[in-house]
């Protein structure tokens, strides 16, 4: 199978809150908002927000999961200074900072934030990429 990723779909509890957060905090513009799904065109893939109960139904599983979701999403930036600047913006916007940027064990520099439904985003500078 070809190594590729086409979509990332987050199952969300409150679609309007989540859409507004990604629009205002990240500054993303929806490519399409139709009914109960929002699509954001990224570089090479689509990021979507969809009600979690409907996503679970589509998969054919129970929607009663809770706790740590066992994944993170990451955005790489060009330098440690860019990471620090981004976190300064997050602080001004009242974003939940889970871990402030710091040098990390793998040789880079990163920190984590959480969206309103505790999906974790890592912002990192990776000097090896």
Image (cartoon, helix red, strand yellow):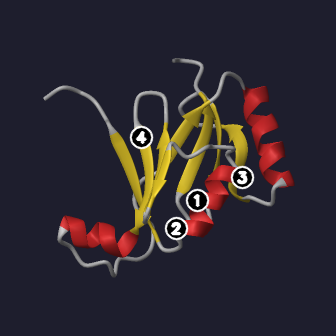
Q: Which label is found at residue 15?
A: 2
Residue for badge 4: 46
Residue on which disc 1 sits: 19
Which quarter of the figure has residue 47?
top left
Residue 114 can be seen in this image: no
Q: x and y percent of residue 101 in the render? A: 72, 42
Q: Quadrant of residue 27?
A: top right
- Whether residues under marks 4 and 2 lie with C-beta atoms below 8 angstroms apart, the answer is no
| Residue occupying the point 58% across, 44% down | 122
Name the residue beneath numbered marker 3: 24
Circles 3, 1 touching at the beta carbon (< 8 Å): no
Q: Position of residue 18 (x, y in %)?
A: 58, 63
* Mark positioned earlier in the residue sequence (3 or 2): 2
Q: Looking at the image, is 62 positioned above or below residue 52? A: below
Callout 2: few (<14), some (14-19), or many (20+) C-alpha neighbours within 10 Å?
Answer: some
Q: Secondary structure at mark 4?
A: strand
Q: Nearer the viewer, residue 41 or 68?
A: 41
Mark 2 near mark 1, Cβ–Cβ under 8 Å? yes
Q: Who comes first in sequence, dot 4 or dot 1? A: 1
Q: Earlier in the sequence, mark 3 or mark 1?
A: 1
Taking the spot 41% from the left edge, 40% from the top edge, the residue there is 46
Horizontal relation, residue 42 to residue 59: left or right:
right
Q: Position of residue 93 (x, y in %)?
A: 81, 55
């Amino acid at each position: 199978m070809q190594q590729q990723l086409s979509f990332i779909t987050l199952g969300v509890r409150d679609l309007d809150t989540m859409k507004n957060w990604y629009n205002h905090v990240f500054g993303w513009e929806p490519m399409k908002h139709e009914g109960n799904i929002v699509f954001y065109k990224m570089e090479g893939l689509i990021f979507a927000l969809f009600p979690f109960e409907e996503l679970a139904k589509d998969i054919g599983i129970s929607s009663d999961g809770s706790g740590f979701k066992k994944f993170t999403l990451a955005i790489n930036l060009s330098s440690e200074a860019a990471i620090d600047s981004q976190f300064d913006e997050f602080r001004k916007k009242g974003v939940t900072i889970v871990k402030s940027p710091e040098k990390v064990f793998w040789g880079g520099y990163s920190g984590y934030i959480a969206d309103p439904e505790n999906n974790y985003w890592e912002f990192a500078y990776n000097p090896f990429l």
